[in-house]
Amino acid sequence: MENPSRTRCSVLIVGAGISGITAAKMLAENGVEDVVILEAADRIGGRIRKEEFGGLTVELGAGWIAGVGGKQMNPIWELARRSDLRTCYSDYSTARYNIYDNTGKIFPSGVAAESYNKAVESAIAKLRNQDSDNSVDDETATGGANINLCGFREKEFLVADERGYEHLLYKMAETFLFTSQGKILDTRLKLNKVVRELQHSRNGVLVKTEDGCIYEAQYVILSASIGVLQSNLISFSPPLPRWKTEAISNIDIMVYTKIFLKFPHKFWPCGPDKEFFIYAHQRRGYYTFWQHMENAYPGSNILVVTLTNRESKRIEAQSDEETMREAMEVLRNMFGHDIPDAIDILVPRWWNNRFQRGSYSNYPIYVNPQIVDDIKAPVGRIFFTGEHTSEKFNGYVHGGYLSGIDTSKALLEEMKAEKERKTESHKSFLLEPLLALSDAVFDIPRQLFLRSSNLGFSEAIL
């Protein structure tokens, strides 16, 4: 009797983020519908995640559609336009004119702009020096080394829609999964399924989940983040080859934390050129970059402060009350001691989320192109996808989207090639007896053949 917890499918996709959903959609459009998607969380979206806060929908993870207005159309922007997703233009460059010191004084715009420009020039000079000192030549350098200064002029739009950024994923999912009243009811999508082990061989992949379920698939698309791949959440049997593990370990994972603070009323300056402001503190990254939500949501009375990496990990380890105390101290340094206390706080914890282990991948400025190839290369029947496999757009939502397309195309080609190999093998199997008979016939002396006028071919006299 078959184990009821064992499921078989042609392709199993681990993860229902932008890459996993896109890959599944591409497979379905090409006739591969025997697909199962396992998602560890209780929702789809991955690092695209909304939450209600202060009466609004805020984005805890990916929040902007970047690279709009460049030479090529951003596919995510196109999806947003089709779905009439509400967005708001963000101009980061205005932050340089809104820099506060710890006494609440704003640096004169000329001084701030000059310091900003010097910092940019210094960074560019540093990159050029690294270029001349680096052993990797221009033709082989890739990833972050492909610096296009014109790219800085591309626009970014904040997603400000009550349906959330994740609405784009639901719109994609409903094209190939059964949905009703905005909910995905298709049994091919399985939530709360934490994959812990992949046993792979030349015949297929056995997938084991934390709740004891077993899935057998001909192929697996693994869309886990680079942070998860670097952790011990998923084990491989046999272990991944050394070239693969080295490539995975060579990519950094960035932690990007947006802390939301709700106030009874606004006390900060507003306006198109006041959306972003900076706190200049002697400790690098200490509650430095601030944004008000009035442009996107007038009357929201919400401030957002962004922390990264070391500071992100630090605040994840402390209580929200302590984080609020620190943030209020900084705000009072900027705007005076008479400002009101925040009435609510929301602190995402991407680093301590074992299903994410960070926010996005970060390629070194100079990265060996072999590492890039190894990151996205399949291991047997396991194919890898995600924003970390996108050479040009790693770290971006459109990078995850495009990687899902690329991975599904590669898998479709492999499935086609395997089918052709099996067809050729089957033909050979059927021809073997005939070939053996032919060999035997050619061993018969020529004079033993007579011509049959009825059948039209030679018959052996045996």
Image: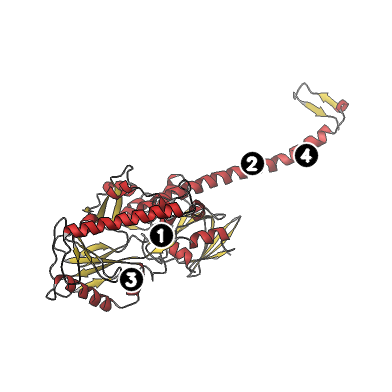
The percent coordinates of residue 340 (x first, y second) are 14, 74
The kind of residue on which mark 3 rests is: Glu
Give the CA distance from mark 2 to mark 1: 42 Å
Which picture quadrant has residue 20? Answer: bottom left
Judging by the rendered image, the residue that carries numbered circle 3 is 311
Judging by the rendered image, the residue that carries numbered circle 4 is 436
- Nearer the observer, disc 1 or disc 4? 1
Which picture quadrant has residue 165? Answer: bottom left
Give the CA distance from mark 1 to mark 4: 58 Å
Judging by the rendered image, the residue that carries numbered circle 1 is 361
Give the CA distance from mark 3 to mark 1: 17 Å
Callout 3: 10 Å neighbours few (<14), some, many (20+)?
Answer: some
Mark 3 and 2 residues: CB-CB less than 8 Å, in contact? no
Residue nearest the viewer, comparing 58 with 117? 117
The kind of residue on which mark 2 rests is: Glu
Callout 2: 10 Å neighbours few (<14), some, many (20+)?
Answer: few
Judging by the rendered image, the residue that carries numbered circle 2 is 424
Mark 2 and 4 residues: CB-CB less than 8 Å, in contact? no
Residue at 39% over, 58% down? 17
